[in-house]
Image (cartoon, rainbow, N blue to C red):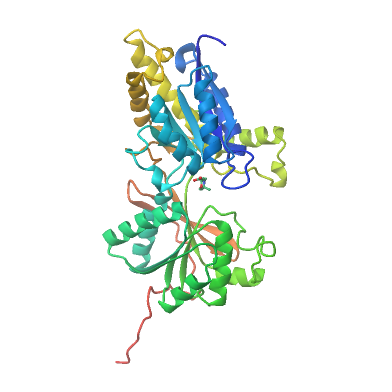
Amino acid sequence: RREDDLHIGGIFPMEGEGGWQGGQACMPAADLALADVNARSDLLSGFKLLLHSNDSKCEPGLGASVMYNLLYNPPQKLLLLAGCSTVCTTVAEAAKMWNLMVLCYGASSPALSDRARFPTLFRTHPSATVHNPTRIKLMQKFGWSRIAILQQAEEVFISTVEDLEAHCKKAGIEIVTRQSFLSDPGDAVRNLRRQDARVIVGLFYVVAARRVLCEVYKHRLYGKSYVWFFIGWYEDNWFETNLEREGIECTVEQMREAAEGHLTTEALMWNQNANQTTISGMTSEDFRSRLNEALREAGYDIDGERFPEGYQEAPLAYDAVWAVALAFNKTMEKLAKSGLSLKNFTYTNKKIADDIYEAINSTSFLGVSGLVAFSSQGDRIALTQIEQLSDNHYVKLGYYDTQADNLTWLERERWVGGKVPPDRTVVVTEL
Ligand SMILES: CC1(C)CO[C@@H](CC(=O)O)CN1
């Protein structure tokens, strides 16, 4: 082990059953970034960054034991990378006891935006609440001030809805009803009809989304008088697949009919300007080619569209390693002024931990996932993308920059009834 090595721990969800096994693409992406930052002579002045990776299976308990192994076995680690909201929650809550920063590349839970519980957490993956200002912006654009919410009873959606309700209150948008369900959305959808809901924000995982859509078809809660907001990170043909396996009673045609015209919001994870050179010298498309090559070598049939889980989030893991390298570089320069280096860091050295915190907190660079910068809560500041399902394929409608309150609109939206659906029953009185 060379004296001038800097060590970080990496906790990746690889081979688990439940949750998000996004380490499959994110670990190769992190390895690419390690090779790139270590090849730069202008970074970390002769030190080499080494990543010690372990599988968490997206299970918090296993994540905790992997973390203890990383911390109680030499060499000493300077920082931890982690994915999955559940694992990040456990690791980030504990890491402060070792004065370790935690950089999460795959955690969307709004509960993580809490400096009291997670004083050393940063994430290149945006919080699920990043969708909410975009949803409000669209409601204002189309004149919808009366909406309904349908959510699955999962922590990430419960806290996202709380944030959405706060945004609606501020914007003067009335929530006529908020329906939630555990796994069967039947009653909840029936209640939406009873309350004459017209503009509905849906928050659930993709398996629940298929159940919702079939209920929507059965209760005829779709077509020219309705607008649905779905989450945009489901796979593109989510409403047509797995129907038999998941016991969905609707046919593909019925699902397509119910899905026609719905809107989606999602955080942008790949820099949109495909030919913009980023800090690594690559464009996001160059990165895609290199990542695909690395995944082919790992045995994935990329050309057969057999992508590993976490492919969408891979730029977040690549940029997380760059954020670490740049922050360590900044800290090394500061420490050198007092004759110290990161080799002086120990798990009880709060002073150097504060220097590393400061360096990460002031991050700002163009990565393959776009501009990498963090809020005071350590949240990724990200752009969102709006799409609409038109004839069974998603059409980009625009992008929203929340920080600048700037909506880029492409004027491509189409409404089943030829005009924007109203948010309530319109009573036409004969004059
Ligand atoms: C967009 C998604 C799929 C949201 O969940 C993240 C995983 C998690 O929050 O546990 C990964 N990225």
* Rendered-image quadrant of the C terminus: bottom left
Name the image quarter holding residue 65. Answer: top right
How far across and down, in percent of the image, does residue 131 sit? 42, 53
Name the image quarter holding residue 121. Answer: top left
How far across and down, in percent of the image, does residue 305 sit? 69, 47
Q: Name the residue furthest bottom.
A: 431
Left-right relation of 316 to 122: right
Task: Please tell me which residue lies in front, 198 or 261.
Answer: 198
How far across and down, in percent of the image, does residue 8 sit? 50, 23
Q: How many marks?
A: 0
Name the image quarter holding residue 345. Answer: top left
Left-right relation of 53 to 322: right
- Residue sitting at 34 percent across and 60 percent down? 165
- Residue sitting at 35 percent across and 7 percent down? 339
Is 213 situated above or below 69?
below
How far across and down, in percent of the image, does residue 325 sit? 46, 23
Q: Is residue 137 visible?
A: no
Is 235 situated above or below 219?
above
Q: Is residue 171 visible?
A: yes
* Rendered-image quadrant of the N terminus: top right
Task: Please tell me which residue lies in front, 174 or 387.
Answer: 174
